[in-house]
Image (spheres, rainbow, N blue to C red):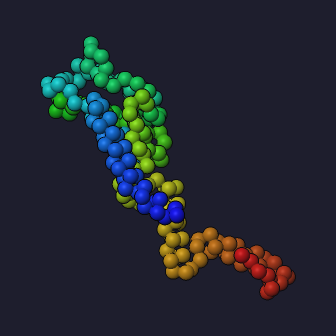
């Protein structure tokens, strides 16, 4: 019975998803800026009147607040950031006197932002397709963890022991070598 109701609702779900995506795209298009992100950073692009000079701009980047605009006019962006940033690693440039490019370095490089300014329309972060990363791009700790996971996955596919199982086996052998008086012949170790 649940199979038929699932089949009946799946086209409707697709329509709901399409409507939600269209709504999200319309909300994002209505913003006075465009933005994209990776797990480590957020890049914001704001079009300005051609011929705009850097001295005409008011750009203030704080740990949890961003203000961008032309001096003497209401700000284009002004509000609390979705998440905190590394101020010292965040920058802005004026490109070809027609576009402000802002690079915000995330403090927590393991999460997606729903929006840039917390009061702006949010995106569905579950729909983000992250770019493939290279092992060399990862920090040492993350790289070691990923390499271990890849090794364990390969071992499982080959029907061999994982790194954890190999480590346990090694510890047991060392313990047995240190305690030859103990008999492990009938011991069942899982």
Q: Say which residue appears at 33% left-offset and 48% top-offset.
A: 18
Q: Nearer the viewer, residue 126 or 137?
A: 126
Question: Is 44 placed above or below 39 here?
Answer: above
Q: Say which residue appears at 51% left-offset and 71% top-offset.
A: 153
Question: Is 172 placed above or below 11 here?
Answer: below
Q: Say which residue appears at 47% left-offset and 45% top-offset.
A: 111
| Residue positioned most to the top | 72
Q: Which image quadrant: the C terminus? A: bottom right
Report which quarter residue 100 is drawn in. top left
Q: Is residue 35 visible?
A: no
Residue 49 x, y percent position in the rendering: 17, 25
Q: Is residue 23 left or right of residue 160?
A: left
Question: Is 15 placed above or below 23 here?
Answer: below
Residue 12 x, y percent position in the rendering: 38, 52
| Residue positioned most to the bottom | 185
Q: Nearer the viewer, residue 10 or 99?
A: 10
- Counting the numbered discs, the total is 0
Q: Say which residue appears at 37% left-offset and 43% top-offset.
A: 20
Q: Is residue 135 visible?
A: yes
Report which quarter residue 87 is drawn in. top left
Residue 81 x, y percent position in the rendering: 43, 30
Residue 30 x, y percent position in the rendering: 28, 32
Question: Is 87 placed above or below 139 here?
Answer: above
Q: Nearer the viewer, residue 70 or 117?
A: 117
| Residue positioned most to the right | 181
Q: Is residue 84 left or right of residue 60?
A: right
Report which quarter residue 40 is drawn in. top left
């Amino acid at each position: 019975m649940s199979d038929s109701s699932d089949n009946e609702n799946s086209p409707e779900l697709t329509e709901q998803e399409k409507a939600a995506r269209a709504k999200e795209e319309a909300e994002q298009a209505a913003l006075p800026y465009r933005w994209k992100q990776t797990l480590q950073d957020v890049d914001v692009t704001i079009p300005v009147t051609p011929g705009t000079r850097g001295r005409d701009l008011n750009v203030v980047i704080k740990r949890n607040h961003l203000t961008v605009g032309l001096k003497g006019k209401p700000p284009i962006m002004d509000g609390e950031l979705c998440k905190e940033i590394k101020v010292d690693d965040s920058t802005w440039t004026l490109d070809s006197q027609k576009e402000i490019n802002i690079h915000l370095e995330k403090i927590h490089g393991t999460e997606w932002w729903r929006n840039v300014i917390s009061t702006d329309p949010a995106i569905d972060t579950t729909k983000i397709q992250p770019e493939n990363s290279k092992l060399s791009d990862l920090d040492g700790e993350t790289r070691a963890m990923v390499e271990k996971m890849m090794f364990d996955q390969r071992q499982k596919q080959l029907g061999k022991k994982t790194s954890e199982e190999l480590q346990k086996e090694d510890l047991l052998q060392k313990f047995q070598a240190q305690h030859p008086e103990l008999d492990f012949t009938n011991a069942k170790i899982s």
